[in-house]
Amino acid sequence: NLDYNALTNIDDVAKFPALKWLRLNSNRLSSLPDLSKLTELRKIYLRGNHFVSVPEMLKGIPSLTDIDLSGNSRIAEIPGWLAKKQGLEHLSFSGTAITRLPEDISAWKSLKTLQLGNLALSRKEMDRIRAELPDTAVVF
């Protein structure tokens, strides 16, 4: 747990390949180092940092089930690779600048929760998300 430490760099975290959870909430991170050696990492919490986009290096961690990017107010879109990532159970984008999810979110059928609070989503978009993810608890 490295929450609330004003961190701008976490390069040394990559030295712990057995990590399963990584909490980095409320720091000053705008990028992540190569964490591909963290092959057992399942949960990463990046709430309240300075990311302007979803960190692409997360693509290389196949075991991820939980990603929290809420409160990164400059993230405006969810990249296609994340929309295709299977095995995800919990995603949070609350408090970002996202106004629309990718067209195809069928890979997210295993999601248990999807947090989209405080987003400028249209009613049509909310209805589409609910229809495509009927077994997911979606919080708007």
Image: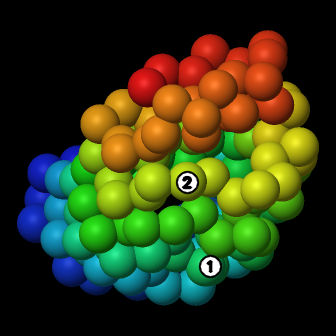
88 sits left or right of 23 in the view: right
First in residue order: circle 2 vs circle 1: 1
66 sits left or right of 97 in the view: right
Contact between marks 2 and 1 (CB within 8 A): the answer is no
The circle on residue 98 is: none
Residue 93, percent from left and from top: 44, 46
Tell me the kind of residue under disc 1: Met
Tell me the kind of residue under disc 2: Arg
Foreground residue among 59 and 100: 100
Q: Is residue 54 visible?
A: yes
Residue 106, percent from left and from top: 89, 43
> Which residue does the numbered mark 2 point to in the structure image?
100
Residue 132, percent from left and from top: 81, 31
> Which residue does the numbered mark 1 point to in the structure image?
57
* Position above or below: 110 against 56: above
Q: Residue at 36% across / 32% down in the picture?
A: 117
Foreground residue among 2 and 134: 134
The quadrant in which residue 98 appears is bottom left
Secondary structure beneath dot 2 equals loop
Q: Quadrant of the N terminus?
A: top left
* Position above or below: 75 against 85: below
Foreground residue among 82 and 27: 82
* Position above or below: 87 against 29: above
The quadrant in which residue 62 appears is bottom right
